[in-house]
Amino acid sequence: MRYFVAFTDVDPPYVNTDPACAVMISPTCISPFFRFTWGRPAEVLIDSGAYHHNRRRRALSQEEAVEQQMRILGALPEASRVGVMHCDVLPRQGISPAQALEATLVNAEKFLSYPLPGKVERVAVAHGDNPEEMYAVIRYLRELGYSRIAVGGLSRLNFQHRPKLLRLLEAAGEAGQDAELHALGLSGATLLPLMSQCGFASCDSAAPALFAVHGSLIYSHPFRRYRLDNALLNRADARQRTSLYEPLASPLPCPCPVCSTDPELLSTPGVEGTWYRSIHNYLHLKAQVEGRQVWERPYSLDGSRYGLSS
Ligand SMILES: [Zn+2]
């Protein structure tokens, strides 16, 4: 499976460390004034921002979504492959689940006739509240002609409704056998084998940066999560949703470009340290998702390119 790292405008430019980087961008996570000072990413997925708009109880039209997505596309260095997602509609106050689903499918149909630059691939977003619905939605999107489908609404089930999540993944896999499936916001190590078995081609998450902010570190093969035992990094209010975070006195041996420069960089406080931990976490999570054992070149860490002291 391919790993897309979610990028917000406070994250390090992962692509400057990893030219094979695949990035997921949401228009709601990037300031309109943000300048991409990046190298060329290998792949980019741009979502509609519907999820964040919905959380703010604001409707987003398909037209508005495409306009914002094209603005980001215009500002980005040209990637080898670009996918733009259709504007799905989520249930909220005044919009029932059935109405949201219908509006999502209407938008998917509309999106097919939007003029997009030639190389840009259209990606439909599927939701389903139960396995039967998920199956039917994906089959419908396939009939409309979509060959790339991103499956949403799964990550919120990860902690409380694991059995339901597994059934939805299986239903999506069964319906989307002849399509390229992407799991939105899902990169949990215990789910990876099932996602891969169900035929998912890729997934994304913001985990590298989310973990980094709280001083947490990911290591791959085997997958492990630790929290650096460092008063400067640990916050009393930091979320700790599982018991899998073991305290760690000092970083473990690691061949990533941060640790091979100086493992103590991971303990740096402030934004600089968050960026170093994000890069370390990104490379480990990607290695875990993509089934790579180790990474070597072309990964590199050039502090000056991050605007950091080296
Ligand atoms: Zn490292």
Image (spheres, helix red, strand yellow):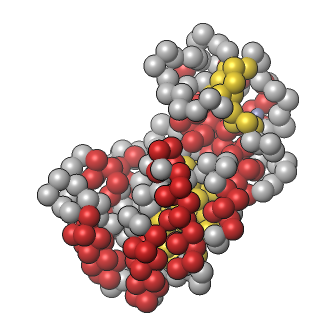
Whether residue 310 can be seen here: yes
In the displayed structure, does residue 274 sit left or right of residue 228? left
Q: Residue at x 63, y 63 (%)?
A: 195
- Residue shown at 49% from the left, 23% from the top: 238
Point out residue 256 in the picture as x, y percentages from the top left corner: 79, 38
Which residue: 66% across, 32% down?
Answer: 244
Instruction: Please state which of residues 109 and 300 is positioned toward the viewer in this rendering.
Output: 109
Identify which residue is drawn at 57% across, 77% down.
Answer: 174
- Above or below 289: residue 97: below
Q: Is residue 252 left or right of residue 158?
A: right
Identify whether 228 is placed above or below 196: above
Left or right position of 1 against 51: right
Q: Quadrant of the N terminus?
A: bottom right
Residue 200 position within the rendered picture, expressed as x and y whole percent measured from the top left = 62, 68
In the displayed structure image, the side of residue 26 where residue 196 appears, left or right: right
Q: Residue furthest front?
A: 163
Residue 19 in view in this figure? no
Please tell me in which quarter of the rendered image ligand 1 is found. top right
Residue 297: x and y in percent read 83, 50
Return the x and y of residue 210 as percentages of the image width and height. 53, 36
Nearer-the-camera pick, 234 or 280: 234
Task: Using the rendered view, name the quadrant where residue 212 is placed.
Answer: top right
